[in-house]
């Protein structure tokens, strides 16, 4: 157990639907990052939050949004889902805002299948 | 876009042999990290090497960094079946605030 908790582990949903993925960071970590991993795109950075504030944005579609709550857990909302959104979605956390400094702790991921 | 590119894409070795994989990147970095991912699981941080370091060891892992060539290598010595996984390099770029991952090297260790 890495200390980063992601729920649910698996999600199957239909095109056009909306889902919410949840992440609880490791105790003491203030930064949360979301990544999408697919066979054709590899690991793509989506977005980072630090202590409740959006810190950096990557290749995140407009149909996707995220937030970090006061208790530091984060949610990634995916809407108007398309078949191509099927992927593994990872949450990672780190202690500080300088995300690369000490390495990330990854959760076990949510496998999203859009049918 | 991916900052790091691993080579080879796949590697198959016998248990007990050494495994070497390389990573090349494009822009200046603060540090470079290596992660391991077992099939369908989360990534596990293995080792971090800073831009002013040239070599680092951790157990059976040895990482080198050549900033002039913008490349790094990861050596796993005396491989074990449990080392079967995908290995990713990730860079923390000097002018950016996100960790960028390469496409990974899939290592298979045969018993």
Image (cartoon, coloured by chain):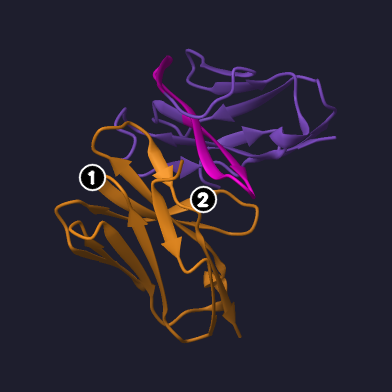
Mark 2, secondary structure of its residue: strand
Taking the image as shown, residue A10 lies to the left or right of residue B78, namely right
Is residue A6 visible to the viewer in this orientation of the structure?
Answer: yes
The hue of chain A in the figure is purple
Badges 1 and 2, same chain: yes
Classify mark 2: residues with Cα within 10 Å, few (<14), some (14-19) or many (20+): many
Letter of the chain that mark 2 sits on in the rendering = B
Q: Residue, x 30% and y 62% (percent of image)?
A: B72
Residue B41 x, y percent position in the rendering = 61, 51
Residue that carries the numbered disc 2 in the rendered image: B43
In the depicted structure, whether residue B69 falls above or below residue A18: below
Is residue A102 visible to the viewer in this orientation of the structure?
Answer: no
Q: Nearer the viewer, residue A81 or B48?
A: A81
Q: Nearer the viewer, residue B102 or B56?
A: B102
Q: Residue, x 36% and y 44% (percent of image)?
A: A103
Magenta range: A33-56
* Residue A37 belongs to magenta span: yes
Q: In orange, which chain? A: B
Q: Residue, x 45% and y 52% (percent of image)?
A: B102
Residue that carries the numbered disc 1 in the rendered image: B28
Mark found first going from the N terminus, 1 or 2: 1
């Amino acid at each position: 157990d890495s200390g980063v908790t992601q729920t649910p582990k698996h999600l199957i949903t239909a095109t056009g639907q909306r889902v919410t993925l949840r992440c609880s960071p490791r105790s003491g970590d203030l930064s949360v990052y979301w990544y999408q991993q697919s066979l054709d795109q590899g690991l793509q950075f989506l977005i980072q939050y630090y202590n409740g504030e959006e810190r950096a944005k990557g290749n995140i579609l407009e149909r996707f949004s995220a937030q970090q709550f006061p208790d530091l857990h984060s949610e990634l909302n995916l809407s108007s889902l398309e078949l191509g959104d099927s992927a593994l979605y990872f949450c990672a956390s780190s202690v500080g805002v300088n995300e690369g400094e000490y390495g990330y702790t990854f959760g076990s991921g949510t496998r999203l299948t859009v049918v | 876009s991916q900052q790091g590119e691993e080579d080879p894409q796949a590697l198959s070795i016998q248990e007990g042999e050494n495994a070497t994989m390389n990573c090349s990147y494009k822009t200046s970095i603060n540090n470079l990290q290596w992660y391991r991912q077992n099939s369908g699981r989360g990534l596990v941080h293995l080792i971090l090497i800073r831009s002013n370091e040239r070599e680092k060891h951790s157990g059976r892992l040895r990482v080198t960094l050549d900033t002039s060539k913008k490349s790094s290598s990861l050596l796993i010595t005396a491989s074990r079946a449990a080392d079967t996984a995908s290995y990713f390099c990730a860079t923390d770029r000097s002018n950016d605030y996100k960790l960028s991952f390469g496409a990974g090297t899939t290592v298979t260790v045969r018993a």
